[in-house]
Image (spheres, grey):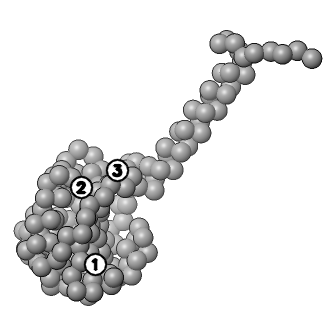
Amino acid sequence: MSNRNMSFGSKHMWYSIGGAVVVALLAWVIISASTGVAPWALNTDQQATSTDTTKTGGGTTTGAGKYPAGWPADAPALQSGAKITYSGAMDPKTDVVGPTLVYTGSGTVATAVKFFTSQFTAKGWTFRGQGNVQGSVQLAATKDTRRVTVTILETRPGVLNVTMGISKQ
């Protein structure tokens, strides 16, 4: 019975390293696809139904969408220049029931966080906190029996994807 150690030039060692690299790449692809960061995983569906220009408290929203049914008047405004890409009665990422919209816009995560925290105050919401999940920033606020959650993801430098949903607590 021989007791061989793996040497630096050993085929077995290189196969092990190659296997680890393949597993790491697969994990990266799966994580990127689930967060929407990878270009091939971005949602390009135009699911909204209107091409109207809508006035919001934060500016004018132009593009392919409109607010979903049941969107409350006291909801935080959208950032200026936002383009609604999805509106509906359920958050497409979490399956939480309630009016939800997704939009793209320009800016940085820091400026979006500042904008939304000021919107919470202006609209009478109580800011509950901020968290970071898989490269995105999540903000939460409450008002009476409702909760608003805002998820901000910078998909590429200067381009934001924002999901805002309102649900019962």
- For label 2, the residue is 160
Position of the N terminus by quadrant: top right
On screen, residue 147 versus residue 18, left or right, reads left
User: Residue 16's x, y, as percent?
Assistant: 67, 28
Mark 1 and mark 3 lie on one chain; the one further toward the N terminus is: 3
Q: Nearer the viewer, mark 1 or mark 2?
A: 1
Task: Quote the CA–CA distance across marks 1 and 2.
Answer: 22 Å
User: For the residues marked 3 and 2, what is the alpha-carbon distance in whole angstroms?
Assistant: 12 Å
As helix, strand or loop, the secondary structure at mark 2 comes to strand
Residue, disc 1: 147
**Which residue is the site of mark 3?**
135
Residue 133 figure quarter: bottom left
Question: Which residue does the image show at 23% across and 44% down from the upper left?
Answer: 157
Q: Earlier in the sequence, mark 3 or mark 2?
A: 3
Name the spot of residue 150 as percent of width and height, x first: 26, 67
Q: Residue at x 16, y 65 (%)?
A: 116
Q: Quadrant of the C terminus?
A: bottom left
Q: Please, what is the three-letter code of the amino acid marked with disc 3?
A: Gly
Residue 84: image location, x then y, percent: 23, 69
